[in-house]
Image (cartoon, rainbow, N blue to C red):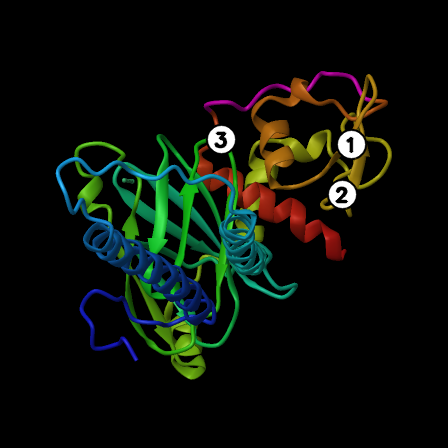
Amino acid sequence: MWSGTPLFPESASTMASRVDALYFFLLAVSAFFSILIAGLIVFYAVKYRRRSPDAVGVNVSGGLALELTWTIVPLIITMVIFVWGASVFFAMSRPPAETLNVYVVGKQWMWKFQHLDGQREINELHVPVGRAVKLIMTSEDVIHDVFVPAFRVKADVLPGRYTNIWFQPTKPGRYHLFCAEYCGTRHSGMIGEVVVMDPTGYQAWLSGGTAQGSLASAGEKLFQDLACNTCHRPDAQGRGPILQGLFGKTQTLEGGGTIVVDEAYVRESILNPGAKITAGFQPIMPAFQGLVTEEQLLELIEYVKSLQAR
Ligand code: CUA
């Protein structure tokens, strides 16, 4: 209903209408009480105005019913907002089980996208309509922030960490992508487009891309080039932990404690292997800090993930 209003971005994801509904509810509650309070101020100012110069105000005390009303009514309203807001927040922060994953690396001042099939894009992201897309994001330098108003999604992109957002586009089109965190001189130019395509168009786009092989296969090659495979062997003879089937598992650490093997842990174990040693192993792995780029890290992570299936 607001699509013609220039104040409102297009609604092009499954989440957009839910966010808008909550937003309009907040707006309506605020407007209602603003008008009510302003109106009452004027009304009472006139009704109880001083009628003679020597009039003295009457002291009022008590009024239990009134106090209960102005406590309980706002409590109910804020609880409605809280529960409603929390449900939208949970839906936004929990991607469905099956998602199309795309890696995002932010850098002054561009967005780099890597598809699992190997396609790379800069400042443009192609996705199919109707599928849940998960962005796994990190930064090469400072804090950036991915913001796609038409999808009502926005999240910080942080150096040294992986953050996720997901969205499910509902209609084909081109949608603005902004950096929403001031990141230096050309922050305002750090923009791009999400191109939502119908499934056949998307397939055509995929097959028309550069045939460099999948992200995982690039990672496998790198794994060999860096000689990781001499220690991380699929059998028990290696000097490092076996990586097959490791991703997503809970690992016991040397010196006690456990950790779930996720993107962040794999990244840390490559850059700074001594930080969390797997129980039963020696801290002998060299650190790869400064030797692999953020993109190469994503390839290695995707390779470790792919070892699941074997
Ligand atoms: Cu990147 Cu602002």
- Packing grade of label 2 (10 A; few <14, some 14-19, many >=20) is some
- Packing grade of label 1 (10 A; few <14, some 14-19, many >=20) is some
Amino acid type, mark 3: Gly
**Residue 137 in sight from this viewpoint:** yes
Mark 1 or mark 2: which comes first in sequence?
Answer: 1
Where does label 2 land, which residue? 246
Location of the C terminus (image quadrant): bottom right
Location of the N terminus (image quadrant): bottom left
- Secondary structure, mark 3, is loop
State how far apart marks 1 and 2 are (Cα): 9 Å
- Secondary structure, mark 1, is loop
Where does label 1 land, which residue? 241
Question: Would residue 105 be found to the left or right of residue 131 on screen?
Answer: left
Where does label 3 land, which residue? 160
| Chief secondary structure of the magenta portion | loop
Name the spot of residue 205 as percent of width and height, x first: 38, 73
> Camera-side residue: 58 or 305?
58
